[in-house]
Amino acid sequence: MILFKKTQSVCPICLRVLPAQRRAEDDGIYLDKVCPEHGAFSALIWEGDLRSYRLWAAESGISEPPVNARAAARGCPYDCGLCERHQRKGCCMLLEVTNRCDLRCPVCFAAAGDGPVKEPTLDEIARQYDFLLAHGGPFNIQLSGGEPTMRDDLPDILRIGRERGFSFFQLNTNGLRLAAEPGYAQTLKAAGLNTVFLQFDGVTDDVYRTLRGRPLLAQKQAAVRRCADAGLGVVLVPVIAPGVNDDQVGALLRWALERAPGVRGVHFQPLSWFGRCALPRPERPVTIPRMLALIERQTDGRMAAADFSGGGAENPYCSFHASYLRREDGSLRPLARRAEGGCCAATSDDARTAVADQWSGEGRRADFAPDGALSETSALDEFLRDARRSTFAVSGMVFQDAYTLDLDRLRRCYICEVDPTHGMVPFCAYNLTDAQGRALYRT
Amino acid sequence: MEDRTYYSIDPRGKLRCVKCGVSLVKGGARFLYLDNGFPVELPVCPKCGFVYVPEELALGKVLAVEKALEDK
């Protein structure tokens, strides 16, 4: 047993802030804490020894303060908005445009459909865009919910964002309306949508029955077809739940690769225990090393754990990613990881551009100067054209719940929910719930 | 650091190699990055092989290719 690097966390029962200690054992890294009222808690945060944990990434010391930050009074995680002690200015902002949903998933971080309908008006959404511009924007925008396509004025929401200079929009959706309504994907694209961030948990219907309450595979497949036909980029987003679909990681990747370049990549979200979650929290939830091992084993090594690295702008223990060039014979070549330490020097803006370029349905290519009389550089043009078509991204984010929350990680979060009362709230603070399901920020 | 000039532009706008005193001509060159080679043609000195890479090319397409080859 080795104790290392203290941090802070919260009590999973009452959410009070507690000192926390990282503890390395042979089978994993644990986060330990003791609440004077509710006792001791220990949560697995990494499967693997201390060496593997440290090799994953060097944490960057780059400071990138939020723009027009609010004063810190009570301390993290109670002053989000963002506060002056936050270490990232923000990359992707989630706008929850409704809490209505046409599914009632047993697993939903937003607990959509619970409580009265909440839907900001177009004027209120315009004010949220303006707030973002005054606080470091434009950012990448994810329209989320609930199910955003429940609103018939979704194209207007895209348009008023475009008018304000936001240039990358992704839609977090279950895909049902995209599948059912011919022309809907084209309508959203014409209004300014780049990418569909599609709930897509597996390649068999039993997975959807467990996680979504009913079989949905046919609709998901139809949604992907319609988006690809409309020129919208598609990113498949599987929640990975132990014992439910952790045996479908390879099948999901193969299914996605067969539909590239329409499908731009797969973004895994190991299940987190916040919001509404009908599944019991296991002793060993899915961590980054487990996710990478599942990818490697179930793709027979075509995608290897060593191809992946941690996020450069956010805390590297929050996410993992690799990009591959698909060759004509179907083989994959991992793109080079940046030089040692280089990946950790990325800023929120670097990440914002990289995500927008990779996930967009159609090129966001800059215009280049034409060749002069003595130059001929078509080899570079051909590569750029092919690289866009043949680059496939595999990534994932491990959200924190009240058991695993590490305030060092939270302070580097660059994915925020936009809240009319609180401002920009880091995703894992916004969705954090205590043992009774009460949230700090989500009302 | 010594300021060295490798090329000049004559009154007709033609590029010249300062070392050899001759005009650059269109010639084969190759960009190499992360195990990838890109055959191109650029202004080169026919005597010493000096290759002139226009700034807009270096900061445009070449930088875009570098970024595409690097994983972010």
Image: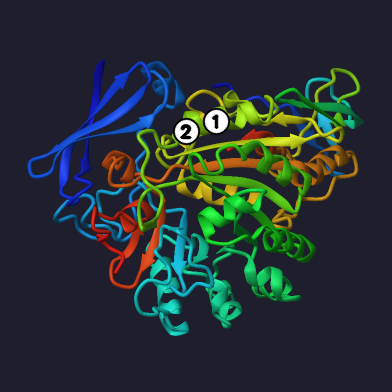
Provide the secondary structure element on which disc 1 rests. helix
Q: Are marks 1 and 2 in contact (CB under 8 Å)?
A: yes
Q: Quadrant of residue A78?
A: bottom left
The residue pinned by badge 2 equals A288
Q: Position of residue B59 (x, y in %)?
A: 67, 42
Give x and y (percent) for residue A56: 45, 25
Q: In the rendered view, does A297 fall on the left or right side of A398?
A: right
Residue displayed at 29% across by 49% down: A86
Which quadrant holds the C terminus of chain A?
bottom left
Would residue A424 be found to the left or right of residue A209 on screen? left
Near-viewer residue (A23 or A407) = A23
Mark 1 lies on residue = A292
Farthest-out residue, left = A36
Total marks placed: 2
Relative to A293, does residue A406 appear above or below in the rendering?
Answer: below
Q: Is A26 in front, or is A409?
A: A26
Q: Nearer the viewer, residue A426 or A62?
A: A426
Badge 1: chain ID: A
Q: Distance of mark 1 from mark 2, alpha carbons?
A: 6 Å
Task: From this view, report whether residue A325 is shown above or below residue A273.
Answer: above
The amino acid on which the numbered mark 1 sits, given as a three-letter code, is Leu
